[in-house]
Image (spheres, rainbow, N blue to C red):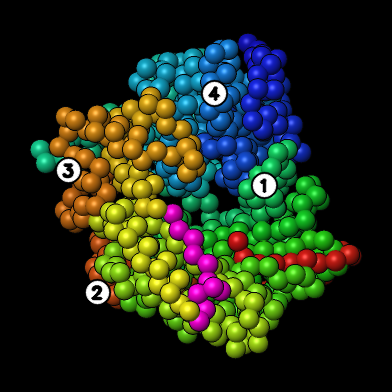
Amino acid sequence: MTVQSVFPALEQLLPRVQKPVQYVGGELNAVVKPWEDATVRWCLMYPDAYEVGIPNQGVQILYEVLNERADTLCERTYAVWPDLEKLMRENGVPQFTVDAHRPVGAFDALGVSFSTELGYTNMLTAIDLAGVPLHAVDRDETHPLVIAGGHAAFNPEAISMFIDGAVLGDGEQAVLAITDIIADFKAQGSPGGRDELLMRLAKSGVMYVPAFYDVEYLEDGRIRRVSPNRPGVPWRVAKHTVMDLDEWPYPKAPLVPIAESVHERMSVEIFRGCTRGCRFCQAGMITRPVRERSMTTIADMVANGLEKTGYEEIGLLSLSSADHSEIAEIAKGLADRYEDSQTSLSLPSTRVDAFNIDLANELSRNGRRSGLTFAPEGGSERIRKVINKMVTEEDLIRTVTAAYASGWRQVKLYFMCGLPTEEDEDVLQIARLAHEVIKAGREASGRKDIRCTVSIGGFVPKPHTPFQWAAQLDHETTDSRLYKLRDAIRQDREFGKSIGVRYHDGKPGVVEGLLSRGDRRVGKVIEQVWRDGQRFDGWSEHFSYDRWMAAAEIAFADEPVDVNWYTIRERELSEVLAWDHLDSGLDKEWLWDDWQDALSEVEVDDCRWTPCFDCGVCDHMGTEIQVGPTNAVMLPMPVIPSRVVANSGA
Ligand code: SF4
């Protein structure tokens, strides 16, 4: 069976939509394989617009891993904007891939990577436009398997009725294992149809299949229990962990966007995982343990990636890049190598306490000093103890003073509002801290034109973190706290004009909170709001809080729960959480103890540098911390001539 490109029909519509170039594909390093030559065909989706989706590392890595297999082809699709969606519906054009414009409905599997839950409504649009039934239960052998991945897959219960499966954790080995199972199943003539294929996937443990689990509820709305409804299906589904990143040096040939995108740089992941133990941070908790990529592999990936892409900026990615045990050598080695070229270096994520001025100078050698970004997260020392962000005011002032003294003019500080136990005073401390930063910076630099921007986001409690039991702050209190902070900074006559404030209102956080700690009943809200026209929830111009609340009212009409029940309610240890059967490796008791430590303002160290404190992950998952120093030598490498322009900060 061959599959025709939908491009001739799509092309007719493109002159009538905004930014049509995002739908044409043909990027440098894109892969198009003959349809007939492949046994298993994957379509990967990042459920947001092309400009946000194309730089996504997860999709780029899996796209290559899958396309390297001779028996497999993999293409990509992104969310289409509402203007094109309307025209596609009117003209019968289905959801398509950007690689060969093949209809998404013809693939064996549609893998959707969620960095955030705010992509859920866009997934429904794609499934529907693909001609695939919205509900997994209505699909048959002719439809692709819809598989969720990414961080939100650690609690996919809210979208369980729309997906066939969810993959927890690192995807590299998991997608290959799924491909093997699909290939075998097809080679055998697809015995038992879709149900049998899903059973094979579920039994192997590679993927969580929600349909094979029943959820029972107590009268008050809490969950009584979640249990498998088929023999042989595991009670708990575990995450996947890639243990040797050097064996998986992807992406080897990063895609170069054809249209404008949010990150125009080549990214190399220098390590995965983080054990700093920030209690709000789901990414840190679910990606344990730390696994470093070696300095030599990083250097090879940078050299190879630059050659294949022509990019002039290298982003060294991880959850806290300056924590790599050999970051100084890596930064120096790369700066030496690309000295006098146009190639710049950046560490998009840097902790205050891991950053030092030598590193900063290395990153900016011979180049301009644009902004630096740090994330103290909590405004007061007390709240930083609650969240286990062990950054003292002294650390912060010392770091930014050094930065201003070394020529930086602009520092960005990121904070959260709505953290557990937080009072107005904790947030107002941000104004005082910014004041001190400017004061110290002016003294150190002798200049008056330095600036500090404080950027504040609303805190949303996430599954698999010690704050999974916490009450989320209501949006009215969040907003009033942020207004008080804004006023306090405006009233700072001495330095107020040197301090910028950026914040969003608290309403999107309520919806994110509903979705991230949601259970299966929340699926009805998602479907309702999508049917009411909701799309692109991550975009303020498309997000409608009122539409979400109206949908929740309808969907929860016969349930003993409402939006507040999911968001501002604190949970007890005894409560069965919607994601308890999904195993991130963390012991629930350890998480609870850490939650109690948070309430007592007790900090926990990083297990990279202190003895293991038994969070459960390594024992459970058969993994271990992998950190250097390796003492491997990155140089000698040929120095690439011309001019270095380097910067740090996001
Ligand atoms: S089990 Fe121990 S070593 Fe492994 S991540 Fe947890 S605390 Fe760290």
Q: CA distance from mark 1 to mark 4?
A: 31 Å
Marks 3/4 in contact by CB < 8 Å: the verdict is no
Amino acid carrying label 2: it is Ser
Q: Which residue is mark 2?
A: 600
The crowding category of the residue bearing disc 4, from other C-alpha atoms within 10 Å (few below 14, some 14 to 19, many at least 20), is: some
Whether residue 62 is visible: no
Helix, strand or loop for disc 3:
loop
Amino acid carrying label 1: it is Pro
Q: CA distance from mark 3 to mark 2?
A: 27 Å
**Coordinates of residue 147 in the picture (x, y in percent):** 46, 32
In this rendering, which labeled residue sits more in front, label 2 or label 4?
A: 4
Residue numbers of the magenta segment: 494-504
Q: Earlier in the sequence, mark 1 or mark 4?
A: 4
**Coordinates of residue 619 in the picture (x, y in percent):** 38, 60
Helix, strand or loop for disc 4:
helix
Helix, strand or loop for disc 1:
loop
Q: Residue at x 56, y 60 (%)?
A: 318
Q: Residue at x 49, y 40 (%)?
A: 541
Q: Is mark 2 within 8 Å of ligand 1?
A: no
Q: Is mark 1 within 8 Å of ligand 1?
A: no
Q: Is 408 placed above or below 289 here?
A: below
Q: Residue at x 67, y 63 (%)?
A: 346
Q: Is 95 placed above or below 534 here?
A: above
Please state which of residues 189 and 301 is positioned toward the viewer in this rendering: 301
Q: Which residue is mark 3?
A: 222
The crowding category of the residue bearing disc 2, from other C-alpha atoms within 10 Å (few below 14, some 14 to 19, many at least 20), is: few
Q: Earlier in the sequence, mark 3 or mark 2?
A: 3
Look at the image and say whether residue 346 sits in the magenta stretch: no
